[in-house]
Image: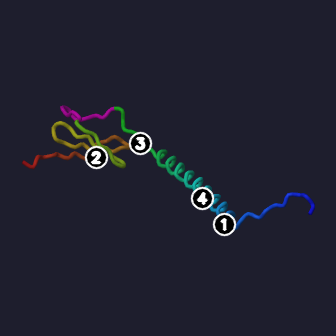
Amino acid sequence: MDGAPREEQEPAQLRRLRRLVTVLTATMIVGCLVVIVVLVIRLADRSPALPQVIELPDGAAAVALTQGPGWYAVVTDDDRILIYDRMTGTLRQTVRVTSGE
């Protein structure tokens, strides 16, 4: 014959395996990109920051603070919950806490 090396055909199973690995690699890359994009979107979603100073009524001292969308609340040592508007900082509502005893 002519002395040139003959190229052998790769088996069908090997071709299928090669395609499968390529598809799975592409799927992993797309999945990682989706996770990164979702994390960036979620972490970039910033609500208005809490104020540096919260004016409490005379004689009240803060015991706890909690926040929700559009509001934040301060629990005071005289058993009140003061709910403030997050955007304006104005007092929206005062809730008196009574013990059940």
Structural distance between the alpha carbons of marks 2 and 3: 17 Å
Q: Earlier in the sequence, mark 3 or mark 1?
A: 1
Q: Which mark is residue 80?
A: none
Task: Indicate the amino acid at tag 3.
Answer: Pro
Structural distance between the alpha carbons of marks 2 and 4: 54 Å
In the image as oriented, which residue stretches furthest toward the right? Answer: 2
Task: Indicate the amino acid at tag 4.
Answer: Leu
Are the residues flagged by discs 3 and 1 in contact, CB closer than 8 Å? Answer: no
Q: Which residues are magenta?
A: 53-62
Structural distance between the alpha carbons of marks 3 and 4: 42 Å
Q: Which mark is residue 92?
A: 2
At horizontal 57% and vertical 51% (from top left) the residue drawn is 33
Q: Determine if the magenta segment contains residue 83.
A: no
Question: In the structure shown, which secondary structural element does the residue marked by tag 1 occupy?
Answer: helix
Task: Indicate the amino acid at tag 1.
Answer: Gln
Main SS, magenta residues: loop
At horizontal 71% and vertical 66% (from top left) the residue drawn is 11
Nearest to the eye among marks 3 and 4: give it. 4
Q: Which residue is mark 1?
A: 13
Image x and y of residue 57, in percent = 22, 35
Q: Earlier in the sequence, mark 2 or mark 3?
A: 3
Apparent side of residue 32 relative to residue 45 in the rendered image (left or right): right
